[in-house]
Image: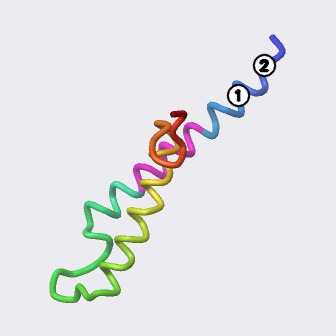
Amino acid sequence: MGNEKALQAFMVKAAEIRTRLEELQQYADDHMGASPDDVSWGHVGGAEYLLAQLTQLTDWAYNRGEYSDT
């Protein structure tokens, strides 16, 4: 089939995405590397940035927000 190479490349990228998601899950489970005694507004800003990036990605994936078809 003509798309065999595309399918292979897609599967490699999908595996890489799963790896990144697992890394992010570990990062979140570890309280983003912050000790509760050391959390500052800088940590809040970092969490807000990460959330904004993830929201953009999920909105794109599910056609929500600025990526909505409607």
Left or right relative to 15: residue 5: right
Q: Which residue is mark 1?
A: 8
Look at the picture and state if 49 lies above or below 28.
below
How far apart are the two marked residues, 1 and 2, measured between alpha carbons? 9 Å
Q: Residue furthest front?
A: 70
Q: Residue at x 46, y 36 (%)?
A: 62
Element at badge 2? Answer: loop
Picture residue at 49% right of the left edge, 52% below the top: 20
Of the residues tagged 1 and 2, which is closer to the observer?
Answer: 2
Q: Is residue 30 above or below residue 44?
A: above
> Residue 22: horizontal and vertical position, in percent?
40, 50
Asked whether 67 falls inside the magenta stretch, the response is no
Q: Is residue 53 left or right of residue 12?
A: left
Q: Which residue is mark 2?
A: 3
Q: Is residue 2 above or below residue 30?
A: above
Say which amino acid is labelled 1: Gln
Q: Which residues are magenta?
A: 14-23
**Mark sitting earlier along the chain (1/2):** 2
Nearest to the observer: residue 9 or residue 67: 67
Left-right relation of 28 to 61: left
Residue 1, located in which quarter of the rendered image?
top right
Q: Is residue 22 magenta?
A: yes
Q: Position of residue 69 (x, y in %)?
A: 54, 34
User: Which amino acid is tagged 2?
Assistant: Asn
Judged from the image, the secondary structure of the residue bearing numbered disc 1 is helix
**Position in image of residue 38 (x %, y %):** 22, 89
Residue 27 percent location from the top left of the image: 35, 64
> Alpha-carbon neighbours of circle 1 within 10 Å: few (<14), some, or many (≥20)?
few
